[in-house]
């Protein structure tokens, strides 16, 4: 059972804007959406990783004793790497590309010299 989750560029960009616009606090939401819709183990793993990462980041920020220390630089770099990884995943890796819709089947052309069909309901050819 291979479920596909297709998304256009507008949807991909909207999910990335949600992650960046919330300053990383809601970066796990698009991955939860994908995991629920598609249900693959890798999708659930990505969701769990981002949810755990955000939990650790919030705890780390809350427990930092002062501003301006070396921990601020490390925290900032880790945050930027996490946000870039999430944005790249949302834009290029998570969603499947749209497939071309198959053309509607057409009726075969009538053979040359075939008698024309009359309207239905007139069995005597009037």
Image (spheres, grey):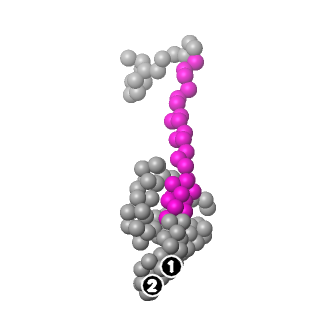
Please state which of residues 89 and 116 is positioned toward the viewer in this rendering. 89
Q: Position of residue 81 (x, y in %)?
A: 54, 65
Q: Vertical placement of 50 versus 9: above or below?
A: below
Residue 29 in view, yes or no: no
Image coords of residue 123 (percent x, y): 42, 24
Q: Is residue 92 above or below residue 103?
A: below
Question: Nearer the N terminus, badge 1 or badge 2?
Answer: 2
| Quarter location, residue 102 | top right
**Pointer 1 with pointer 2, Cβ within 8 A:** yes
Residue 91 in the figure: left or right of residue 121: right
Coordinates of residue 35 in the picture (x, y in percent): 52, 67
Residue identified by numbered label 1: 71
Q: Is residue 49 at least partly visible in the picture? A: yes
Quadrant for the C terminus, please.
Answer: top left
Please identify the quadrant where the N terminus is shown: bottom right
Q: Which residue is mark 2?
A: 64
Horizontal side, residue 65 vs residue 46: left or right: left
Q: Which residues are magenta?
A: 82-111
Magenta stretch mostly in which secondary structure? loop
Q: Is residue 98 magenta?
A: yes
Name the one closer to the observer, 73 or 90.
73
**x, y percentage for residue 41?**
60, 70
């Amino acid at each position: 059972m291979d479920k596909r989750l297709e998304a256009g560029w507008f949807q991909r960009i909207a999910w990335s804007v949600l992650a960046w616009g919330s300053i990383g606090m809601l970066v796990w939401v698009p991955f939860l959406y994908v995991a629920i819709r598609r249900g693959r183990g890798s999708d659930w793993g990505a969701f769990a990783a981002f949810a755990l990462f955000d939990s650790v980041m919030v705890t780390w920020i809350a427990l930092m004793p002062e501003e301006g220390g070396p921990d601020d630089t490390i925290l900032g770099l880790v945050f930027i790497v996490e946000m870039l990884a999430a944005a790249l995943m949302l834009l290029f890796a998570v969603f499947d590309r749209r497939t071309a819709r198959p053309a509607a089947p057409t009726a075969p052309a009538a053979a040359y010299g075939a008698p024309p069909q009359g309207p239905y309901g007139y069995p005597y050819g009037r």
